Image: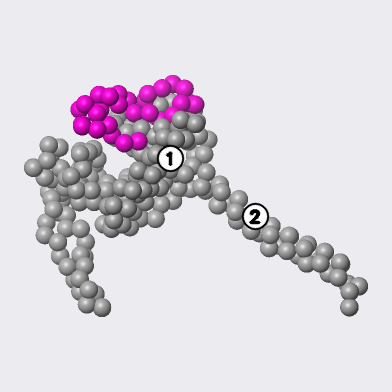
Amino acid sequence: MNRLIIALSMLLTATAVSAAGGGHVLYTFEPDAKNTSSVQRGAKYFMNYCSGCHSMEYLRFNRLAQDHAIPDDLLSKLMFTTDKPGEHILSAMPQEKAAEWFGQAPPDLTLTARLRGADWVYSFLKSFYLDDSKATGTNNLQLPGASMPHVLGGLQGYQVLGEEEHHDDAGGHHGPVEPPFELVVDGELSAKEYDGVVADLVNFMSYAAEPGKAKMHDRGFWALLYVIFILIPLTYAIKREFWKDVH
């Protein structure tokens, strides 16, 4: 019951924050939480780069392994904070210390992709830029003033924020062409490879937010086929049988 109350509180709070922040995103991304290979890679990236600060306390390791065919030997390599597959994915950082160090504890990310949207998460992970005025040395165009450092900077490299270019569309409206980033420090990956890492992370977070969604969609499809090809013809046949002697 306590976990349900906490989850509902997170849902209401995050929804209010999201509504207050508006719906504008810098990039669009269509998640594929049924892509097992991508979700597996995303889980690896999350545990290596995110779980030091962030938890996913509403997802269990064994649920992840069951849904995405992760064998026990590989699953054990993802379990940094426990050796029990039935445990939730918790951060290695003590929450009270995190609040002391950062001013507030880093948020749990289980529901982030559902509440913010995959576009927002994808945009956030691609939109860090160098900013000497910040203690972390970076800022984020999707979430200005973010206290989170660019933990994927070693992979992406570091970019600066230039002046935004605009164009006129057919209706005469003005809008930005692309987020005005310029890479000034190379990372380990090419831009295309980094986009793949971000896509895998967002696919994993989208799965974690709604683990049963893919199965519900599959069941809905078969239920619809049952209604169309079995239930409706059967109902029509019964109706004809009942009414055949009525003139």
Q: In the rendered image of this protein, does residue 11 appear above or below residue 165? A: above
189 drawn magenta? no
* Residue name at image x 86 percent, y 70 percent: 243
Q: Residue at x 52, y 39 (%)?
A: 67
For the question of whether residue 158 can be seen, the reply is no
Question: Could you say which is closer to the camera, residue 214 or residue 42?
Answer: 214
Start-end of magenta stretch:
80-108
- Residue 211 picture location, percent across and down: 49, 42
Asked if residue 80 is positioned above or below residue 26 in the image, the reply reads above
**Residue wearing tag 2:** 223
Q: Position of residue 82 (x, y in %)?
A: 41, 22
- Tag 2 near tag 1, CB within 8 Å: no
Residue 75 at x, y percent in the picture: 45, 29
In this orientation, which residue lies closer to the viewer: 103 or 83? 103
Disc sitting over residue 8 in the figure: 1
Mark found first going from the N terminus, 2 or 1: 1
Q: Amino acid at mark 1?
A: Leu
CA–CA distance in space, label 2 to label 1: 30 Å
**Quarter holding the C terminus?**
bottom right
Give the percent coordinates (x, y) of residue 191. Answer: 24, 51
Furthest residue in direction left, as rendered: 132
Neighbour tally class for label 1: few under 14, some 14-19, many 20 plus, Cα within 10 Å? few
Residue at the spot 27% in from the left edge and 48% down from the top edge = 124
